[in-house]
Amino acid sequence: MKEIKDYLKQLIWLAVHKPNWFQNPHIEKLVTDDFFPLLISNIPIKLNSKCFVKPSRRAKLIAQAKRKMLANLEKPLTLKQLAQNLGSSNSALLYGFQDLFGISPMRYLKVRRLNAVRQHLKASEPENCTILFLASEFWFYSPSHFTRDYKTMFGELPSETLAKHYKI
């Protein structure tokens, strides 16, 4: 439920601070394709053997999903798009990532994107790097949520990473 709450907070922040963002014709589909799988994945269900992909097939599917995600860190990617591209179902990806990593596919993507931002910050010069622009390149549009998630994951603010790793 926390993921749903965070997602809705991010949408509300965008609506208040960047209302023109919603004028983009692709945003409605992006939000729909992101929100409904997130909502469905948070509904408790009783698992049965029909829900599971065979372990070897699951490992192959997750490896393909990881490659696709890494190739698209700077592009919008929803769970639905990922599943369709891999010829799989949302649930197979959800169960596979949960089983292998203990997190959802979209949480995995967020972690990889946060890592990508961190690598860029470490390699950038403070006067030539705008943290919010860099974050938006990796689909983080709420500065407060981005900063919170970044600090939670790395134990420091993005600005601290940028300053600490810059060598004169």
Image (spheres, grey):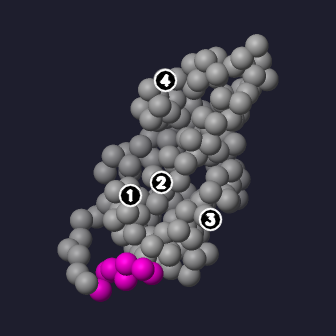
Label 4 crowd (10 A; few <14 / some 14-19 / many >=20): few
Query: Image quarter for residue 53?
Result: bottom left
Mark 4 or mark 3: name the one nearer the start of the chain: 3
Image disc number at residue 108: 2
Find residue 22 and report its horizontal and vertical position in percent.
64, 49
Which residue is painted at 57% across and 19% down in the image?
160
Find residue 88 and report its horizontal and vertical position in percent.
50, 79
Q: Disc 4 versus disc 3: distance between alpha carbons?
A: 29 Å
Amino acid type at image mark 3 = Lys
Label 2 crowd (10 A; few <14 / some 14-19 / many >=20): some
* Residue designated by label 3: 68
* Residue designated by label 4: 156
Nearest to the observer: residue 108 or residue 9: 108
The answer to if 1 sits in the magenta stretch is no
Amino acid type at image mark 1 = Phe
Image disc number at residue 52: none
